[in-house]
Image (cartoon, rainbow, N blue to C red):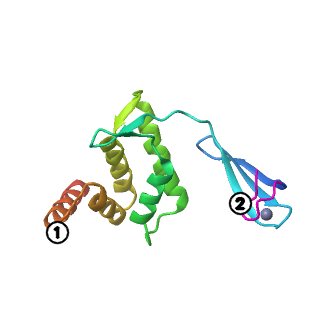
Amino acid sequence: MKCPFCGSDDTKVVDTRHDPQGNVRRRRECTACDNRFSTVERAILTNPLVVKRDGRREEFDPDKLMSGLRIACARRPISAAMLERVVERVEYVMRQTGRTEVPSQMIGDAVIEELRKLDEVAYIRYAIVYMGLKDLESIRAEIDRLRLQRH
Ligand SMILES: [Zn+2]
């Protein structure tokens, strides 16, 4: 494992633990620059291809999903670990379908569902971008729907 700070190949493991998802997390220290970083080892499972609205296919990209989530959750009380769980959960939902292709809308819906449980503000932000809520009326309708579900 190369050090992400200085590129040295010489790093040592200072801590190893298993997280609840069954991944192995290792805390490493670079012997050249002394910086520490973490690595996650996990089983590679094949994700279905994502079919976009215009019919194009693309690989599911967890990093892209994560950056979208970070934007939606900016300055909200949501930890990086919580966002990782959302991404894992969405991947899980996709794999559970057992299909080789899933519509992009299915991913959007799964994300929305997870965010709704997590944080209402983040949920609305995500909905505005990904559900294409373009005006105050549709945003307001979505907020009303959220309120109704809560009571
Ligand atoms: Zn280093």
Give SS at disc 1: helix
**First to last magenta residue range:** 1-9
**Picture coordinates of residue 61 (x, y %)?**
47, 46
Q: Nearer the viewer, residue 46 or 97?
A: 46
Numbered disc 2: secondary structure: loop
Label 1: few (<14), some or many (≥20) within 10 Å? Answer: few
**Residue 8 within the magenta-colored segment of the rendering:** yes
Which callout, 1 or 2, points at the residue further toward the start of the chain?
Answer: 2
At a point 81% along the width and 61% down the height, the residue shown is 30
Question: Mostly what secondary structure, the magenta segment?
Answer: loop
- The amino acid type of the residue labelled 1 equals Leu
Q: Is residue 76 left or right of residue 108?
A: right
Picture coordinates of residue 38 (x, y %)? 70, 56
Q: Which residue is labeled 2 in the image?
A: 4
* Residue under pointer 1: 136
- What amino acid does circle 2 point to? Pro
Point out the quarter of the image occupied by ligand 1: bottom right
- Position of 65 relative to 35 (above/below): above
Judge whether residue 116 is colored magenta.
Answer: no
